[in-house]
Image (tube, rainbow, N blue to C red):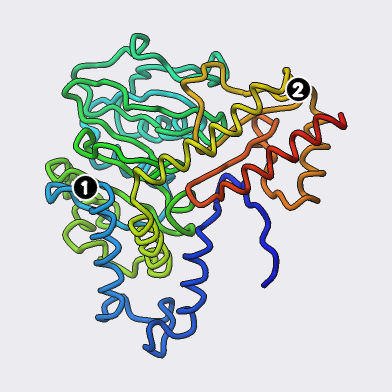
Amino acid sequence: MEKRVYNLSAGPAILPEEVLLEAQKEFFSYKGSGMSVMEMSHRGKIYDQIHQEAEADLRSLLNIGDNYSVLFLQGGATLQFSMVPMNILKGKADYILTGAWAKKAAKEAKKIGSVNIAGSTESENFNRLPRQDELKLDSEASYVHFTSNNTIFGTQYRTEPEVGNIPLVCDTSSDMLHKKFDVNKYALIYAGAQKNMGPSGCTLVIVRKDMLERSDDSLHTYLNYKTHAESNSLYNTPPTFSIYIMGLVYKWLLKNGGLDWIYKVNSEKAGMLYDFIDGSDGFYKSAVAVKEDRSLMNVTFSTPNEDLDKKFIAESAVKGFSGLKGHRSVGGLRASIYNAFPQKGVEDLVEFMKDFKAKN
């Protein structure tokens, strides 16, 4: 087999090797059906079982109750920046700004209604999260929107902000399923699949059913959450192959111990990398100002100067590490160590970083 690189890309991101090999085995003829999943009818019995099992396994992982609808949609989380306010913004909403994606979400919401920026650390280049005591929430807001993990800046919420009785909405695109959390605290959760769940092409939406009452019948049919909830995400052809892979990822998590298991793995991987950065006598520096706000998914850091950053990227690529360049808007370095990134990969990265520091 061709040697695989250590894929540290922020997304589309690494998938479990076990899942890829299973999909490879079934690619030509799924379970003896004579068809690839990509070829079969989304109305047929074989695909229907794949679809139903994916939803059932996700509900099991997150303990999602019957009072929530699970939707498999298209258009990426970017379309949800618009669909969320189109469906549930009635008058005004609160948005907490913690990075580029939260800003884009707020921009789309402003086209639908009034947006109150309840908290923002943009003046500090988003190098930390807004504290609870800094939030200025509107008690009459339709909902409060926040982004749980910020891929560009490397910050992540450990627990959700406290918003009282206001419905809570979250973009969990880059840390969905990295640990167990209480779905019942949320009115709506959405996530692009291509970080922790599967290939690009599918967006997961978990919406509390009472929120569907806000979806007005005057909305374009495909942009109405009720359309997809009532048709079990089968109003039109869904991204069948993406959903199939997502289902395999859910089974992989369940088989290995679920979300408590993967959280332990993620904490150990990130801890190893942050401990080395902190102990490097300043040669490597974390981009996040508050340790408690550091992401377990996207470790953002830098060397003493831009020239060394470029050298680090070039030399790491030769050693089999891919995707370590920081986002173009902020520069620096970024190691995205999502669920499927192996612990051995973090160990090898630390060894490379030690060697690079010694030589430079």
Classify 10 Å Cα crowding around label 1: few (below 14), some (14-19), many (20 and above): some
Please tell me which of labels 2 and 1 falls first in the chain: 1
Classify 10 Å Cα crowding around label 2: few (below 14), some (14-19), many (20 and above): some
Residue 314 in the image: state x and y as whole percent. 81, 44
Q: Nearer the viewer, residue 91 or 309?
A: 309
Q: Secondary structure at mark 2?
A: loop
Q: Nearer the viewer, residue 52 or 179?
A: 179
Residue 60 in the image: state x and y as whole percent. 24, 54
Residue 106: give its label: none
Q: Vertical placement of 356 versus 11: above or below? A: above
Q: Quadrant of the N terminus?
A: bottom right
Q: In this rendering, would 313 be left or right of 291?
A: right
Q: Vertical placement of 272 versus 44: above or below? A: above
Question: Residue 189 appears in which quarter of the rendering?
Answer: top left
Q: Quadrant of the C terminus?
A: top right
Q: Vertical placement of 115 versus 314: above or below? A: above
Q: Secondary structure at mark 1?
A: loop
The amino acid type, in three-letter code, at marker 1 is: Asn
Residue positioned 29% across, 68% down in the render: 51
Question: Residue 326 appears in which quarter of the rendering?
Answer: top right
Residue 354 in the image: state x and y as whole percent. 76, 33
Residue positioned 54% across, 39% down in the render: 269
The amino acid type, in three-letter code, at marker 2 is: Phe
Q: Are marks 2 and 1 in contact (CB under 8 Å)?
A: no
Q: Outermost residue, right direction?
A: 359
Residue tagged 1: 63
Compute the Cα span from label 2 to label 1: 43 Å
Q: In this rendering, would 266 be left or right of 60?
A: right
Residue positioned 14% across, 46% down in the render: 209
Residue tagged 2: 283
